[in-house]
Image (cartoon, rainbow, N blue to C red):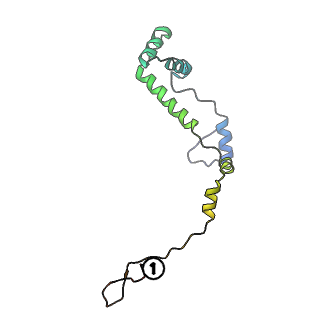
Amino acid sequence: MNFLPNTFHEPANLLADLASLPPKPPRSKLEPHRELIRELRRSGRTYREVARIFSDRLGFHVAPSTLHSFVKVRARHRKQVQFELPPLMQAVTEVVPSGRVAAFKAKPLASETKRTRFVFRENEPLTLSSDGGAQ
């Protein structure tokens, strides 16, 4: 498999090439301990206490700020996944307008006549209209 920058790949071939690549190892050294960190945080442990537990029990030295960053990034990712919108077709079929909204939309627009208080005639001073402002 050859990925040259100037070589044109068909999209189907490119997807097949990408599928055959081995999975990437996790970038964080904390990834194997993800569930342990989550459970310790849920039980009310501070990042400093979690770092001390890692150091004492696992012989694994990690800074509390590193733990905080690790948790924060994964929490942001979970929020993005949690608030996904439903597929478009499903959302369209579920939306049914109420009777009042449908009646309002079906109602023809009433054309209002513009009311003016003054009558303008060229070369004459402005005068109040005599019919109460209706044109």
The correct choice, above or below, for 88 with respect to 53 in the image is below
The correct choice, above or below, for 77 with respect to 94 in the image is above
Horizontal side, residue 9 vs residue 68: left or right: right
Picture coordinates of residue 13 (x, y %)?
68, 44
- Front residue of 28 and 21: 28
Which secondary structure, mark 1? loop
Name the residue rendered at 64%, 38% in the picture.
18
The correct choice, above or below, for 98 with respect to 72 in the image is below
| Residue 119 figure quarter | bottom left
* Quarter of the N terminus within the rendering: top right
The correct choice, above or below, for 25 with respect to 117 in the image is above
- Front residue of 85 and 59: 85
**Residue occupied by mark 1:** 134
Picture coordinates of residue 56 (x, y %)?
46, 8
Picture coordinates of residue 6 (x, y %)?
56, 48
- Can residue 10 be seen at all in this image of the molecule? no
Name the residue rendered at 30%, 87% in the picture.
125
Q: Residues within 10 Å of mark 1 (few under 14, many from 20)?
A: few
